[in-house]
Image (spheres, rainbow, N blue to C red):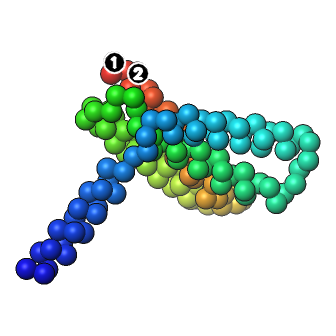
Amino acid sequence: MERESICERERSQLEKLNKFQLGNQYKKVGYIVAIGTFIVMIARKYIEDSEWMRPILHGILLIGLLVISLSKEKLEDEFIDSLRAQSYRLAFIIIVYSLIQPLINFGVAFLLNQNEEMKSFNYFQVLFFMLIVQLLFFWKLKRMNR
């Protein structure tokens, strides 16, 4: 009996986590944070190029994009949920491709006896690209299926 109750509790916790979404009002907050941070990042280049601010701004921008990504639509139904899941899958596939691409480039350059350095992405580039791709696919899928 005790084992079943532990399994059921774990299952219910996983279901809650799987269905986690922020309210629709957070979408505006996410846009304000993301766009505001992006503007500050551009202004920082021209006004004061302080290197210590860069990781802070990167983190804030990622949080803004994540808030947009996790926010509900005004009319959230199973179809929107399906589109969101599709957009996450497509973003993941594109990210895996973009992570493998430098290896392929290095392998081809090695086979052709060219001197090419192995280029990789940092965490910000991967997360930023994945969130942007997910949001763009979600908007495109939503627009196509109206």
Residue 17: x percent and y percent?
34, 57
Image point 78% across, 41% down: which residue? 40
Q: Percent x, y for residue 99?
A: 53, 55
Marks 2 and 1 in Cβ contact (< 8 Å): yes
Q: Is residue 1 visible?
A: yes
The quadrant where residue 143 appears: top left
**CA separation in Å, label 2 and label 1:** 6 Å
Residue sitting nearer the eye, 121 or 118: 121
> Who is closer to the viewer here, 48 or 2?
2
Residue 120 seen: no
Considering the numbered disc 1 on the image, is that residue within a helix, a strand or a loop?
Answer: loop
Q: Which residue is mark 1?
A: 146
Where is residue 33 drawn, in percent x and y? 64, 41
Report the amino acid beneath label 2: Arg
Query: Badge 2: few (under 14), some or many (20 or more) residues near its Cα, within 10 Å?
Result: few
Amino acid type shown at disc 1:
Arg
Which residue is disc 2 drawn over? Answer: 143
- Please tell me which residue lies in front, 106 or 48: 48
Q: Is residue 54 left or right of residue 26?
A: right
Kindly indicate the quadrant of the structure image that contains residue 91. top left
Residue 69: numbered disc: none
| Residue extending furthest toward the right | 47
Left or right? Give the position of 16 relative to 124.
left
The foreground one among 3 and 110 is: 3
